[in-house]
Image (cartoon, rainbow, N blue to C red):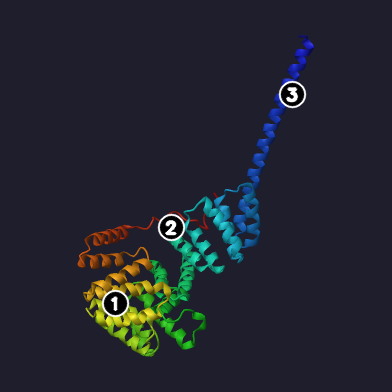
């Protein structure tokens, strides 16, 4: 091989090496440029998120083109879209983020708020409940907003006790808030489903009832009792008033509560929550036949989602009276209508045992024990406005 050929080949190898090195440098430079671009977009989106959510959405979209698996990008874009009332787009963004990080409670709660705005109420409530289970985070304003919205959705369908239950976790935080008190008042009276259509007199009733119920929930018994006394004094014949006072007295003074429930049913014969609670106390006090009259009436009035309670209570009343066949039939029906209620399985186990059905009794008792042992998952770190970018 001539010297010229060796020189030519050496030059070719050198050129190839230099070309590859150039390409590697160009790729590294491009990656660095993309990284810098992402960082700039993310930083700017965070800066304008509260003041200019529309601009934040645009910036998050650009950043997500560079890094599609950026969890915070999807979630905060969803939050910005929620602020803009673009609920369908917000839902899409939040779901994308939750596909990547499914155990962020605040994101589930915000998704539930979006779904509720899109009239997908059942899914919205389910996702809010999942958010509560995982943890709603440290932003108290956000938690209040989520719980109040969920409570209003529950009130709209007549789920008064569930609506009130949404407020109780806030009682540990010792806050007073007009929206919380309004929810408590509507729930305590168990008559009105929407505050927007109340007369001035009804609004005053809700206000007094709400303050009393929230005082009771936050450990101020003297203030609560004074509030309920004021409510009964000012509105002795109004629907829900005696029921609200009776609810508060149930544990501390069952006999007084019983009389208040009876007064409520006399004043408002179709007040189905009062009928249910009156029957409950009558069963406790060994008056199952009186309870059955009220339960049969309640069964005609309750929303569909509450019929299982009527059947379970009717079964319990028959069990108290020693009528095992109708007790078993009603309790079995209740278990078909609702799942996961430990108490029904307990009463059914007792009815089977007394009827001599040992295997059935053992099965139901085991199911009761299984359900009682179920614990809620531990709350996990939540998506927080104070820690936007990762």
Image check: 98 left or right of 269?
right
Q: Could you classify mark 3 by the number of other residues whose Cα lies within 10 Å: few (under 14), some (14-19), or many (20 or more)?
A: few
Residue ranking furthest to the right? 4
Report the Cα–Cα distance between label 1 and label 3. Answer: 92 Å
Q: Nearer the viewer, residue 328 or 177?
A: 328
Report the Cα–Cα distance between label 2 and label 3. Answer: 59 Å
Q: Which residue is rendered at x = 39% and y = 66% of the image?
A: 169
Residue 284 sits in which quadrant?
Answer: bottom left
State the image coordinates of residue 135 (x, y, percent, origin top left): 43, 59
Q: Is residue 51 above or below residue 212?
A: above
Q: Secondary structure at mark 1?
A: helix
Q: Is residue 152 visible?
A: yes
Residue behind mark 2: 134
Numbered label attached to residue 242: none
Image check: 75 left or right of 190?
right
Q: Could you classify mark 2 by the number of other residues whose Cα lies within 10 Å: few (under 14), some (14-19), or many (20 or more)?
A: many
Numbered label attached to residue 280: 1
Q: Which residue is rendered at x = 39% and y = 73% of the image?
A: 306
State the image coordinates of residue 123 (x, y, percent, origin top left): 50, 64
Q: Could you classify mark 1 by the number of other residues whose Cα lies within 10 Å: few (under 14), some (14-19), or many (20 or more)?
A: many
Q: Is residue 122 above or below residue 199?
A: above
Q: Which residue is rendered at x = 66% and y = 52% of the image?
A: 62
State the image coordinates of residue 107 (x, y, percent, origin top left): 51, 58
């Amino acid at each position: 091989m001539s010297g010229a050929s060796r020189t030519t080949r050496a030059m070719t190898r050198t050129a190839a090496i230099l070309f590859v090195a150039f390409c590697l440098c160009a790729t590294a430079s491009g990656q660095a440029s993309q990284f810098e671009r992402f960082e700039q977009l993310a930083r700017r989106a965070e800066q304008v998120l509260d003041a200019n959510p529309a601009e934040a959405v645009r910036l998050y979209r650009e950043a997500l083109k560079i890094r599609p698996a950026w969890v915070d990008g999807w979630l905060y874009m969803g939050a910005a879209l929620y602020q803009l009332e673009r609920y369908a787009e917000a839902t899409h963004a939040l779901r994308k983020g939750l596909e990547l990080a499914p155990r962020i409670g605040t994101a589930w709660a915000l998704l539930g708020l979006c779904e509720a705005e899109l009239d997908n109420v059942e899914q919205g409530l389910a996702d809010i409940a999942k958010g509560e289970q995982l943890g709603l985070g440290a932003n108290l304003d956000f938690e209040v907003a989520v719980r109040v919205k969920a409570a209003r959705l529950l009130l709209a369908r007549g789920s008064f006790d569930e609506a009130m239950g949404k407020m109780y976790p806030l009682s540990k935080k010792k806050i007073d808030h007009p929206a919380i008190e309004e929810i408590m008042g509507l729930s305590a009276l168990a008559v009105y489903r929407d505050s927007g259509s109340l007369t001035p007199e009804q609004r005053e009733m809700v206000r007094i009832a709400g303050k009393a119920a929230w005082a009771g929930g936050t450990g101020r018994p003297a203030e609560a009792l004074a509030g309920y006394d004021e409510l009964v004094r000012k509105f002795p014949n109004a629907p829900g008033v005696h029921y609200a006072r009776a609810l508060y007295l149930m544990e501390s003074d069952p006999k007084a509560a019983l009389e208040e429930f009876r007064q409520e049913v006399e004043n408002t014969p179709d007040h189905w929550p009062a009928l249910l609670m009156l029957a409950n106390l009558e069963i406790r006090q060994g008056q199952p036949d009186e309870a059955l009259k009220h339960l049969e009436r309640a069964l005609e009035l309750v929303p569909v989602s509450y019929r299982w309670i009527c059947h379970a209570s009717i079964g319990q009343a028959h069990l108290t009276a020693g009528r095992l066949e109708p007790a078993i039939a009603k309790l079995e029906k209740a278990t078909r209508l609702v799942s996961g209620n430990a108490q029904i399985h307990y009463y059914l186990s007792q009815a089977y045992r007394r009827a001599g059905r040992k295997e059935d009794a053992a099965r139901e008792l085991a199911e009761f024990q299984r359900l009682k042992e179920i614990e809620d998952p531990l709350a996990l770190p939540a998506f927080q406005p104070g820690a936007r970018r990762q």
